[in-house]
Amino acid sequence: MALENAQFDAALSAAAGNDASLQLELRNAFVESAELQLDLLKRSRCDANWELAAMRLKGLAASFHAGQLQNLAQEALVSAPGEPTVIREISVHLAEISGQQ
C-alpha cells in the first residue's frame, strides 16, 4: 500500500509541482471522479452500465498511476453487476486515498 500511495503522490507532484494547494485540489478532484464512478457501479443493474463505470474508473486510476485502484476496477470488470465485495473494496480504498480512513 505504501508503494501505491507513493506512486499516486508522485503523479500528483508531477502534475502540480511544489504547489501543495494544487496537489490537494487534484487529489480531491481525483477522489470525487472516482466516487462518481463508484456510485454508478453501485446503481448499475446491467452488464453494460457496470462495465462502462468500471472501465472509466480503471482509466482514471491509470492516469494517476493508482495501481491498486486499477486492479480493483479490473476486478469489477470481471465481476457481476452489483458485486458487493468489489464495491466495498473500492470504497475502502478511496477512503484511504482521501485520508478518511
Image (spheres, grey):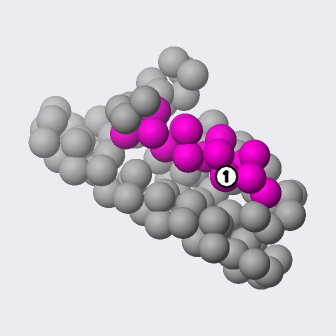
The image quadrant that residue 3 belongs to is top right
Q: Position of residue 58 (x, y in %)?
A: 63, 57
Q: Position of residue 84 (x, y in %)?
A: 74, 52
Queried whether the magenta region covers residue 97, the answer comes back as yes
Q: Tell me if mark 1 has few (under 14), some (14-19) or many (20+) residues whose alpha carbon lies within 10 angstroms of its own.
A: many
Is residue 25 placed above or below 54 in the rendered structure?
Answer: above
Queried whether the magenta region covers residue 73, the answer comes back as no
Q: Position of residue 90 (x, y in %)?
A: 61, 46
Q: Which residue is mark 1?
A: 87
Residue interval drawn in magenta? 83-98
The kind of secondary structure element at disc 1 is helix
The residue at the point 63 percent across, 37 percent down is: 68
Can residue 59 be seen from the camera position used here? no
Can residue 76 be seen from the camera position used here? yes
- Horizontally, residue 82 falls left or right of residue 23, namely right
Secondary structure mostly seen in magenta is: helix
Is residue 96 placed above or below 56 in the rendered structure?
Answer: above
- Between 30 and 49, the residue placed more toward the observer is 49
The three-letter code of the residue at mark 1 reads Ile
Q: Residue most toward the top?
A: 2
The residue at the point 43 percent across, 30 percent down is: 101
Q: Which quarter shows the N terminus?
A: top right
The residue at the point 86 percent across, 64 percent down is: 80
- Between 64 and 73, the residue placed more toward the observer is 73
